[in-house]
Amino acid sequence: MGNASITTRGLNHFFGKGDARKQAIFDVNLEIERGSLTILMGPSGSGKTTLLTLIGCLREVSDGSVSVLGHELNNADEDLLVGLRRRLGFIFQAHNLHESLTSTQNVLMGLQVHGGGNPQKQRDAAHHILNLLGLADRRDYLPSNLSGGQKQRVAVARALVSNPEIILADEPTAALDKESGHKVVQMLKSLGKARGTTTVMVTHAPRILEMADRIITLEDGHIVSDQRQ
Ligand code: ADP
Ligand code: MG
């Protein structure tokens, strides 16, 4: 698989059954290099989220091939998928923070799925990432006392705290002002350089497009453009 962390071959995806069956992804072939920042663009309904969730082991791959970190997802058993999901970081539009937990506790949830670990070290890791995201003075706040942008940054911290090998982000900067959106993406980019973290992100923000290594555009489930910059 060379230096690719994600490969798709002849990938198709269908929703629904019988008369309601509808194809959302058509013959997608991709090789995404380790450490790169790739942006997925395209109109609403073009298949961006479907593609991200297929790569993220959140949706069954049943037609064609997806390989993630060297493992085939088509026909993969649940143990393999669970193990792979732990190596990925997800940042979604709806930030899904637990309303009863503070910023630090929410970030710790990003480590809990991994089990074990020294609690003091885990707290230090959570505080460190919150500091990097400019939330040092918000770490003991509940989500209801945070702005939309701050909540989104807590969700980013939760995704990054476990040092995932691949980050899948669906419009992670939509709720952020320009400056903090830029900062978050800059952080993802430097993780790519420092640790080889691969990021695939859906976004439309022009200033963020400039920061990508590659921009892939989907229309009606087809890749219509694939530009490296
Ligand atoms: P995007 O993220 O680019 O807006 P999606 O991947 O969400 O697009 O959707 C691609 C297509 O698949 C759309 O036509 C959408 O209606 C359809 N679709 C997405 N999710 C489902 C689902 N759970 N059930 C049925 N159809 C779906
Ligand atoms: Mg979407």
Image: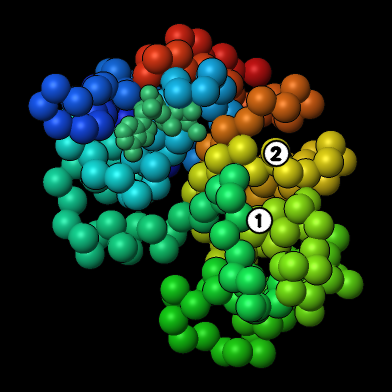
Residue at image point 24% right, 44% down? 60
Residue type of the residue flagged with mark 1: Val
Q: In terms of secondary structure, where does tag 2 sit? A: loop
Q: Quadrant of residue 127?
A: bottom right
Residue at mark 2 to residue at mark 1: CA–CA distance: 12 Å
Q: Which mark is residue 85?
A: none
In this view, which residue lies farthest toward the top? 224
Q: Residue at x 52, y 85 (%)?
A: 117
Q: Assess mark 2: CB under 8 A from ligand 2? A: no
Residue position for label 1: 156
Q: Position of residue 179 (x, y in %)?
A: 87, 41
Q: Is residue 70 visible?
A: no
Residue 30: give x, y in percent of width and height.
Answer: 38, 25
Task: State the image coordinates of residue 110 (x, y, percent, origin top left).
Answer: 55, 69
Q: Closest to the observer: 53 or 132?
A: 53
Residue extending farthest to the front is: 19
Q: How is the image coloured?
A: rainbow
Closer to viewer: mark 2 or mark 1: 2
Place residue 23 in its image quadrant.
Answer: top left
Q: Quadrant of the N terminus?
A: top left
Label for residue 174? 2
Note whether residue 53 is visible. yes
Q: Is residue 79 left or right of residue 95?
A: left
Q: In percent of the image, x 70 and y 54: which residue is there?
A: 152
